[in-house]
Amino acid sequence: MKGFAVLSALAILASSASARTVFSELVVNGVDLGHGVAIRVPSSNVPVTDITSNDLICNTGFIQPVSTDVAQVPAGAQVTAQFHRTSAGYLGPDPSDPLDPTNKGPVLAYLARVPDATQSDVTGLSWFKIWQDGLDPNTHQWGSDHLFNNKGNATFTIPSCLQAGQYLLRVEDISLLNANSYPGAQFFMSCAQIEVTGGGQAQPAGTPFPGAYRSTDPGIVTNIFLDSTYTPPGPAVFQC
Ligand SMILES: *[C@@H]1O[C@H](CO)[C@@H](O)[C@H](O)[C@H]1NC(C)=O
């Protein structure tokens, strides 16, 4: 029986190593903007695994042409980032959509102020975290479990005190299934192009990507089968 259990665990690991997810659609205060609108959607659902790569910022290999739309987002708005298994979005019932449910890990959202949300250069920006969903120690549900149960919807609020202007919104799912050592964690992210309207005066301090994550972070190197508590990587969540 023990041997069988080990084999089953290996089979699960092998079958889920290919599980993928892509953030490709934005919903603002209940209004769905449509697939790929105001988002740089990577054409491949292959994860980024090198946390020193510029691909960690907003991903790479975008579906062309990249959207030139900038989503109007009132400060304090409720925003939903929709993830699906492939860059094509929702394709019908699929047990691995929006992701393989064995791919446990956190879901996180960041913003960076930019002169022009459609600019192609995303290096040298300063990112602050506005939301994260790690591991609930009571239910033992991960952010990825909530994402799966919510059919790919990750919902959070844009800080109401934020200064108006153009921003990139980086929403990320991290699979920790193979994160026992580095590299191992798999990073799935896209950036949406938004213009925050209204708001206040807050200009939160940020951290760079790459740089916000380190190969020694307990949020990057961990064992999901042993974790009872978990702290997502990156800075603390900004609060107004
Ligand atoms: C996901 O978001 C869309 C758009 O707002 C909504 O129509 C749908 O009901 C949501 N699904 C779940 C399971 O929350």
Image (tube, rainbow, N blue to C red):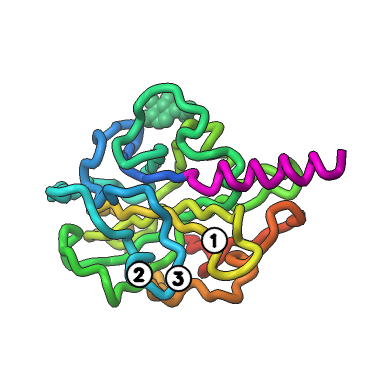
Residue type at tag 1? Ala
Taking 37 as reference, is 17 left or right? right
Find residue 224 and report its horizontal and vertical position in percent: 69, 54
Find residue 21 and report its horizontal and vertical position in percent: 43, 44
Residue at the spot of label 1 = 185
Q: What secondary structure is the stretch in magenta mostly built from?
A: helix
Taking 169 as reference, is 177 left or right? right
2 within the magenta span: yes
- Mark 2 surroundings: few (<14), some (14-19) or many (≥20) residues within 10 A: few
Residue at figure coordinates x 16%, y 50% from the top left: 66
Taking 1 as reference, is 61 left or right? left
Residue extending furthest right?
Answer: 1
Residue at the spot of label 3 = 51
Label 1 CB, ligand 1: below 8 Å?
Answer: no
Would you say residue 167 is visible in this rendering?
Answer: yes
Please state which of residues 30 and 39 is positioned toward the viewer in this rendering.
39
Dot in front, 3 or 2: 3
Find residue 104 and report its horizontal and vertical position in percent: 60, 48
145 within the magenta span: no
Residue at figure coordinates x 68%, y 47% from the top left: 10
- Mark 3 surroundings: few (<14), some (14-19) or many (≥20) residues within 10 A: many
Give the alpha-carbon distance from disc 1 to disc 2, as whole Å: 31 Å
- Over which residues does the magenta segment extend? 1-19
Marks 3 and 2 in Cβ contact (< 8 Å): no
Residue at the spot of label 2 = 203
Residue 217, placed above or below residue 68: below
Number of disc labels: 3
Residue type at tag 2? Gln
Disc on the earlier residue, 1 or 3: 3
Mark 3 falls on what kind of element?
Answer: loop
